[in-house]
Amino acid sequence: MSKELIEIAGKKFVPMISADELQARVRELGETVWRENASANPLFIVMLSGAYVFAADLLRVIPTPVDMAFVKYSSYEGTQSTGALKREIGLPESIKGRTCIVVEDIVDTGVTMKQFMADLKEKGAADVKIASLLVKPENNKANIKVDYCGFSISKEFVVGYGLDFDGNARNLDSIYKCID
Ligand code: 5GP
């Protein structure tokens, strides 16, 4: 992993989780998710935009065709959660009776996931599990239970591997944390 400090829009970031660590952990998670859920013919629901890289790697561990859907809920502006949710791309109608596995980049306060779980229930999902690359347990006030967690981190703001700072840095192959 690069030891370089990087600067994005005037804020400083340092390396936190290397590309190799991410690849190894995501492979492990993908194998576990598939071993435990293959028989349920799950529908994978990817939370855009942040989870797109995680989902691409996680779901390519699965050796057989699976159903996928994409949703987009947003609550962040800059480095802070606004608490107010916008459903920019909503759920498909086809989830009734399905086992759904939500693929998320990070569970922070849990507000987004709490609302999303309520939406899934309302649309008739039979069972819902969460796979999140990152979790910030100290901030998770909504007490969201993450079934498949890549890494627990503390409260720092992170970018890379799909996660952005106002649209920038999603392409980085490792995760960086803000030190400002
Ligand atoms: P929550 O509703 O759990 O507070 O926040 C969920 C969303 O906020 C995540 O899906 C993600 O898009 C964004 N988010 C939370 N923490 C971070 C972070 O450290 N970095 C980035 N880039 N986004 C974050």
Image: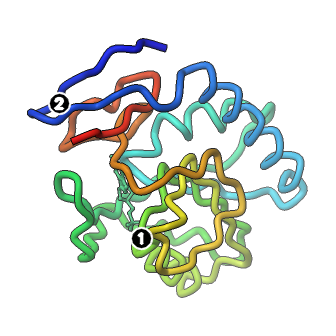
Q: Which residue occupies the extreme bottom position in the image? A: 122
Location of residue 89 with respect to 17 vertically, above or below = below
Quarter of the rendering containing residue 55:
top right
Residue at position x 79%, y 35% in the image: 64
On the image, the x and y values in percent for residue 7 come to 18, 26
Contact between labelled residues 1 and 2, with CB atoms less than 8 Å apart: no
Dot 2 surroundings within 10 Å: few (below 14), some, or many (20 or more)?
Answer: few
Q: Is residue 108 left or right of residue 144?
A: left
Q: Is mark 2 within 8 Å of ligand 1?
A: no
On the image, the x and y values in percent for residue 125 come to 65, 77
Location of residue 22 with respect to 55 vertically, above or below = above
Residue at position x 48%, y 78% in the image: 114
Secondary structure found at label 1: loop
Q: CA distance from mark 2 to mark 1?
A: 24 Å
On the image, the x and y values in percent for residue 172 come to 38, 23
Q: Which residue occupies the extreme left position in the image? A: 10
**Which quadrant contains ligand 1?**
bottom left
Residue underneath mark 1: 109
The foreground one among 134 and 59 is 134
| Residue type at tag 1 | Thr
Dot 1 surroundings within 10 Å: few (below 14), some, or many (20 or more)?
Answer: many
On the image, the x and y values in percent for residue 155 come to 41, 56
Location of residue 17 with respect to 157 vertically, above or below = above
Q: Is residue 81 left or right of residue 154?
A: left
Secondary structure found at label 2: strand
The foreground one among 139 and 124 is 139
Of labels 2 and 1, earlier in sequence is 2
Q: Is mark 1 within 8 Å of ligand 1?
A: yes
Q: Quadrant of the C terminus?
A: top left
| Image disc number at residue 139 | none
Residue underneath mark 2: 8
| Residue type at tag 2 | Ile
